[in-house]
Amino acid sequence: MSCFACGSRLKDPPRRSGHSMRSRSLSGIVDSLEIEKRALSPDGERSGGSVVAIKQLNREGVQGSREFLVECLMLIMLHHPNLVTLIGYCAEGEERLLVYEYMSQGSLEGHLFDVPPNKEPLDWNTRIKIALGAAKGLTYLHDTVNPPVIYRDLKSSNILLDDDFNPKLSDFGLAKLGPVGDNTHVLTRVMGTYGYCAPDYAMSGKLNVKSDVYSFGVVLLEIITGRQAVDFSKEFDEQKLIEWSRPFLNDRRRIIQLADPLLQGRFPRRAFYKLAVIISLCLHGKPHLRPTMRDVTAALDHVASQPYISDANRKNYCSTPLPLPP
């Protein structure tokens, strides 16, 4: 089987599994759990006790079946280092299971928010590595694939991390083929996650790749602030990250105050400014003025070339904690 975008041959196409996998299912939606790869083997033999992740979709309603089909087709056709690998699936009776490679570090969300004291927070260089990898995955979907694929549900919980914190985009149930030819958008039912969805798409139903760019800007904002896109546990004027952050993004003198306190000031000041500019462009209210993901990736690559170096005497580097304003 070959990738329909670039023509490269896939090493091991996803397999359809039968009742042996179904018997291991759990009720509700399961993001990830450990299971022997034996459940995927055609002959039922143990194949090294590998660990995989299983996602079980809601069996009720047409939407669950549609998302299952879309996700299966997308991940069978698409092939990129920053997209999660589909190992197998089960479509027996009403059961709908997807089996992925296991991502040992969980989601980006789990490393940014409510980090327990005994857990090491993500440092600056790792955050940029994750952002750059996710951007490369989106660039592949938008520029390499023809017609382009619009992810439509980019958020920190859908960015999964392996042992080395390499990111992979997951959950393609809402993905949609983008416009072709002279068309600038596709009209579709508004889907996505509150707080990440581009306002122009939410109001009009007009979807294009710039909708993903907006969502990526929200994720970048989460990465530098350590705050969730929407957090109703905070004071009213701080619940929506974009609204809270705009005064800082628009004032160069206050931009540094956006920094996640868990970074403890350990980040390169110039690179932080550049990343804030990238975020502002991604979040532009007019979609045609947002950059392409290819341009965003190039900009992030430049930011990554200026890593944080632990040296208190280096110029242009911030070496003292800068807490967020009250």
Image (cartoon, rainbow, N blue to C red):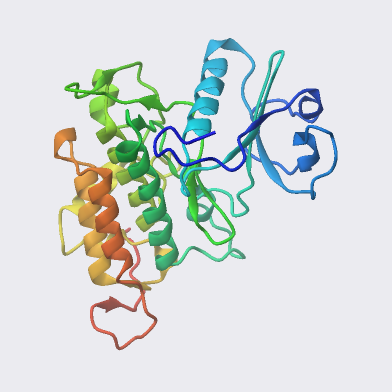
How many marks are shown on the rendered structure?
A: 0
- The residue at 41%/31% (across/down) is 193
- The residue at 16%/22% (across/down) is 182
x and y percentages locating residue 115 in the rendered image: 54, 57
- Outermost residue toward the bottom in this view: 313
Q: Quadrant of the N terminus?
A: top right
Compared with residue 267, is residue 53 higher up or lower down, i.e. above or below?
Answer: above
198 relative position to 73: left or right = left
x and y percentages locating residue 297 in the rendered image: 29, 52
- The residue at 78%/36% (across/down) is 41
> Does residue 244 show up?
yes
In the foreground, 38 or 305: 38
Q: Quadrant of the C terminus?
A: bottom left
> Does residue 238 show up?
no
x and y percentages locating residue 11 in the rendered image: 59, 43
Q: Image quadrant of residue 62? A: top right
x and y percentages locating residue 91 in the rendered image: 67, 20
Q: Image quadrant of residue 19? A: top right
In the foreground, 317 or 116: 317
- The residue at 52%/16% (across/down) is 66
273 relative position to 224: left or right = left
- Outermost residue toward the top in this view: 62
